[in-house]
Each structure stands twice: as C-alpha cells, then as structure tokens.
Amino acid sequence: MVEINAITQGEHELISVKGEIDASSSIELDNALKEAAESGKKILIDLQELDYISSAGLGVFISYLEDLKKNNTQLVIFGLQEKVQEVFSILGLQHLMTIADSKQEAEQLLNEA
C-alpha cells in the first residue's frame, strides 16, 4: 500500500511517498508526477518513508526524465532509505537524476540551478 501526497510549496511541488510502490500503486506515482510536471514548477520528491519500489515504480521516474529535461523542469529526490538507495544505485539512476540526502540539501540544489 502507498500513500502519495502532493503540495505546492512556493516555487516547487513537493511529492511525499509513504509505503511501497509496486505495479498497481505506480499509477498513483505516475499521476502525481504528471500533475507536478504540468505545473511547470520545480519538483521535490520525498522518499524518506518509501519502504520498497518495484521496477514499475522506477520506470515511472525514468519515463519523466526526458520530458522534464525538455521542459527545463528540475527534479530532486531526497531521503532514500538504504535498501531503496541500493536499487537506485544498481541501476545507476544517481547519474540520471539528482538525489539528495535531506530536504534542506534538495531545496539548496533546486535554488542553485
């Protein structure tokens, strides 16, 4: 089960993900990312409470990389738990997207660009 909350905070959208993202719940992540991307604002994704992500969930992130780049929309993911971090690292996603340790670091990265 997953709980996804999206709120606007100033110049960016904050998407918080709690629980597990699998094939069925990846649709909710896709909808939240689509909405955030359409807002034209910078996007922060809080994964501090994400316990598990399947290949379908990872595919959602990957599917938006090109569109976000094309639209010059920044995306920063932060707060990965160790086991989720390992999955991102195995796939080399840290080379394709910006990943920060904390919300403060993520906000700094958004403001620097």
Image: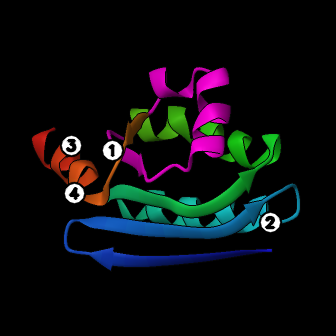
Instruction: In the displayed orientation, state which residue is furthest to the right.
Output: 24
Seen at 68% across and 34% down, the residue is 87
Give the CA separation, mark 2 to mark 3. 28 Å
Residue contact between numbered discs 1 and 3, judged by CB atoms under 8 Å: yes
Closer to the N terminus: mark 4 or mark 3?
Answer: 4
Seen at 20% across and 66% down, the residue is 11
Q: What element carries label 4?
A: helix
The mark closer to the camera, 4 or 2, is 4
In front of the other: 101 or 96: 101
Q: Mark 1 points at which residue?
A: 74
Instruction: In the displayed orientation, state which residue is furthest to the left.
Output: 112
Q: Mark 3 points at which residue?
A: 109
Mark 3: amino acid: Leu
Looking at the picture, how far across and down is residue 28, in whole percent? 71, 69
Q: Is 42 left or right of 93, judged from the image as shown?
A: left
Mark 1: amino acid: Gln
Give the CA separation, mark 4 to mark 1. 16 Å
The numbered dot on residue 25 is: 2
Span highlighted in magenta in the image: 70-97
In front of the other: 86 or 96: 86
Indicate the quadrant containing the C terminus: top left, top right, bottom left or bottom right.
top left
Closer to the N terminus: mark 2 or mark 1?
Answer: 2
